[in-house]
C-alpha cells in the first residue's frame, strides 16, 4: 500500500476524474486496466476486499474534507526496449510529462474547447508531476531508466516487465514514486494498477507507439493514453461505470450507456443525459477529443 501522502492524494483525486468496462478497438484495447484487474482478482482474492475498504475510506473522507490541496508526484519512466524504435528519447519523454502536467492542471491548449454545459465542473486538479531526482538509495538520477531486453513484446497479463531477471525493470518503491513503463505492449494501448493491489506491480504501462507527442501517429498522438491510465492509478473508473447507464461513482458525471470511440459530435446523448461527457479523459475517444479533468 502507498504511504500516507499518496493515500491522501488517492482520496482527493478519486473525486476528480472518472469509469469501467471494456471494448475492442481494432485488435487492441484502448485501455486494458479492467481486464488486467479482473485477471489479478482471480489470483488475489483479497484484492476486492482491499478495493472495498479503500472506497469506504474515500466516501468517509469526502464528507469531511474540501479538495484544496496541491500535490507534486515524482515520476520515474522505465523505458524497456529491444529495437531502436522502442528506445524513447529524452525529448519524447518530456513531451509526455508536459501533457500530464497540462491535463491535470487544466493548462492544456484545448481546454477552451470544453462544451459550456461542462465548464462548471472542468477545473484545475492541483496535481503536478516531475522527474524523480533521487533514487531509492539517494543517488542522483534523471528519473529515466533504460533497459535493453530480449523480450519481443509484453502482453496485458505479463508480469515480466516488473522484474529485472525476466527482461523488465524492477519497480522503484511505489510509496515514493509513480512508475511509468514504456514498452512494446500487445493487446492494449496501456493499462494501470488500481490502489490496493500488489505494490510490486503498482505502475502504469504504455505502449511505445502512443507515448508522448513526438514520433507518434494519430489518433493517439497527444499523450492521453498515459493521462487516462494515470486516472486509473489514482482510483478512477471509466466514465460509463459498469455500462448500461451505470455510475462511475462521481456525482457530477452524466450517466452514459457505453464507451465512445473516435470523436463524436456534441451533443451525443445516451441514457437520460443531454449529451455524453466524451471529452473526459476517462472515456475511450481519440486523444484530440479528450480535453477535461473533472473535479466534483
Image: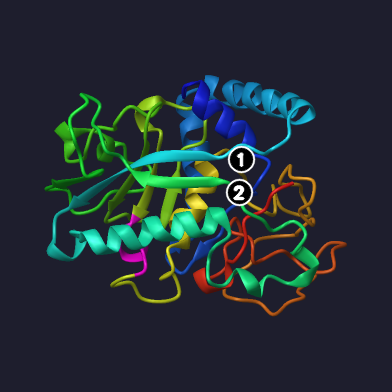
> Could you tell me residue 273's position as x and y percent?
84, 63
Sequence-wise first label, 2 or 1: 1
Give the label on residue 125, or none: 2
- Which residue is labeled 1 in the image? 13
Judge left or right: residue 155 versus residue 114. left
Q: Which quadrant of the view contains residue 264?
A: bottom right
In the image, residue 28 sits, relative to residue 218, either above or below, namely above
- Disc 1 on helix, strand or loop? helix
Other residues around mark 2 within 10 Å, as few (<14) / some (14–19) / many (≥20): many
Quick check: 57 left or right of 27?
right
Rendered image quadrant of residue 213:
bottom left
As drawn, the residue found furthest toward the bottom would be 265
Locate residue 260, reporting x and y percent: 64, 67
Q: Secondary structure at mark 2?
A: loop
**Residue 57's disc number:** none
Q: Is residue 270 left or right of residue 68?
A: right
Magenta range: 207-213
* Residue 229 position within the rendered picture, expressed as x and y whole percent measured from the top left: 48, 50
Q: Is residue 210 magenta?
A: yes
99, 133: nearer the viewer: 133
Q: Residue at x 57, y 72 (%)?
A: 110
The residue under the point 29% across, 52% down is 182
Question: In the rendered structure, are the residues bearing label 2 and label 1 in contact, judged by CB atoms less than 8 Å apart?
Answer: yes
As displayed, is residue 237 above or below residue 226? above
Q: Residues within 10 Å of mark 1 (few under 14, many from 20)?
A: many
Q: Is residue 153 magenta?
A: no
Q: Nearer the viewer, residue 70 or 275?
A: 70
* Residue 196 visible (yes or no): no
**Number of callouts in the render?**
2
Residue under the image location 22 percent in, 38 percent down = 169
Amino acid at each position: 500500500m502507498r504511504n500516507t501522502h499518496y493515500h491522501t492524494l488517492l482520496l482527493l483525486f478519486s473525486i476528480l476524474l472518472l469509469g469501467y468496462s471494456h471494448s475492442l478497438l481494432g485488435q487492441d484495447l484502448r485501455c486494458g486496466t479492467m481486464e488486467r484487474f479482473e485477471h489479478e482478482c482471480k489470483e488475489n482474492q483479497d484484492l476486492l476486499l482491499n478495493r472495498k475498504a479503500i472506497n469506504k475510506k474515500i466516501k468517509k473522507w469526502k464528507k469531511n474534507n474540501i479538495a484544496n490541496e496541491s500535490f507534486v508526484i515524482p515520476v520515474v519512466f522505465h523505458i524497456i526496449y529491444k529495437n531502436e524504435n522502442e528506445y524513447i528519447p529524452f525529448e519524447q519523454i518530456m513531451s509526455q510529462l508536459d501533457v500530464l502536467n497540462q491535463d491535470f492542471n487544466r493548462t492544456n491548449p484545448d481546454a477552451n474547447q470544453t462544451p459550456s454545459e461542462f465548464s462548471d465542473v472542468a477545473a484545475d486538479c492541483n496535481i503536478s508531476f516531475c522527474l524523480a531526482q533521487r533514487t531509492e538509495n539517494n543517488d542522483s538520477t534523471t528519473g529515466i531508466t533504460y533497459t535493453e531486453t530480449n523480450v519481443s513484446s509484453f502482453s496485458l497479463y505479463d508480469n515480466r516487465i516488473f522484474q529485472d531477471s525476466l527482461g523488465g525493470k524492477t519497480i522503484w518503491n511505489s510509496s515514493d514514486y509513480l512508475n511509468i513503463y514504456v514498452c512494446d505492449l500487445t493487446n492494449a494501448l496501456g493499462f494501470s494498477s488500481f490502489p490496493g493491489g500488489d505494490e510490486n506491480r503498482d505502475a502504469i504501462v504504455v505502449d511505445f507507439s502512443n507515448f508522448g507527442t513526438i514520433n507518434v501517429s494519430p489518433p493517439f498522438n497527444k499523450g492521453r493514453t498515459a493521462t487516462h491510465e494515470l486516472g486509473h492509478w489514482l482510483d478512477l473508473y471509466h466514465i460509463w461505470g459498469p455500462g448500461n447507464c451505470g455510475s462511475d461513482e462521481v456525482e457530477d458525471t452524466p450517466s452514459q450507456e457505453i464507451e465512445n470511440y473516435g470523436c463524436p459530435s456534441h451533443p451525443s446523448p445516451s441514457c437520460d443525459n443531454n449529451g455524453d461527457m466524451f471529452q473526459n479523459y476517462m472515456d475511450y475517444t481519440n486523444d484530440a477529443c479528450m480535453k477535461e479533468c473533472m473535479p466534483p
